[in-house]
Image (cartoon, rainbow, N blue to C red):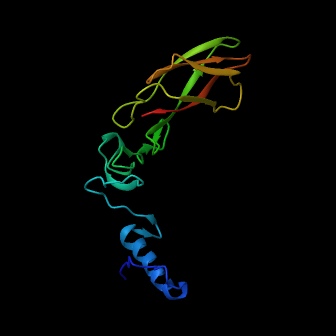
Amino acid sequence: MAFISTIPQETDQISNSQSQLLNNNAALATTLLGVNTAGLLCSDQSSDPLTGANQIALYSRVAKNPVLGTDVLTLRNNTNGSIVEFSGGVNASPGWSRLPSGALLKWQTVTILASTGTSSSTPFTWQTGTTFPAFSNPPWSVMLQGITTTNWIATMGVNSLTATTMNINAYAPAGFLAGTVYVFAIGPG
């Protein structure tokens, strides 16, 4: 079945053009988009598609950023604008992902050690390396979440925040032993 670009016409009656419209949908789904029961299938593009003033492109390509791996889902903004490779990431702890806006999400755990009834400051460094992109500036937001269920820290906060490090400040109430904290941040990638 071939795609018919001249339908529907303004004078067409839906009952007469319905089969043509259904055939067009099927042609788009199988040839242009690669939609099947498994989802959307994208073949790697050899070059980045051109976009106009009111267009964006969502496509697959071989990653230009080696941190992302091999094939990545890519977004190109309007008027041949910026290109964001965003489907790479690590679904583990530590882990990371990138949003289509280019913002970077990172998470990992840290063990907080504090003496009972005192405050402590635990140095923290974000995971980096060949498979972990770095923040280009300090994160916009950091969230701390305790993941142990007993003898927990009363308050936590951060200071001395940079693109790669920070201090996690904690106050340990009576009976505190040690605790694991999930650290989650979003910032410029």
The image quadrant where one finds the C terminus is top left
Q: Position of residue 142 (x, y in %)?
A: 56, 28
The residue shown at (45%, 83%) is 20
x, y percentage for residue 97? 46, 42
Q: Is residue 109 above or below residue 173?
A: below
Q: Quadrant of the N terminus?
A: bottom left
Q: Nearer the viewer, residue 141 or 128?
A: 141
* Above or below, comparing residue 42 to residue 16 in the picture: above
Q: Which residue is situated farthest in the left direction here?
A: 46
Question: Quarter of the image holding residue 83?
Answer: top left
Q: Where residue 41 sits: x, y (%)?
A: 40, 63
- Which residue is pictured at 35% across the width and 55% down the height? 60
Q: Report the residue that reaches farthest toward the bottom.
A: 16
Residue 129, horizontal then vertical, whole percent: 35, 31
Q: Considering depth in this image, is 22 or 12 the residue closer to the camera? A: 12
**Left or right: 107, with 129 as reference point:** right
Q: Which residue: 31% across, 58% down? A: 44
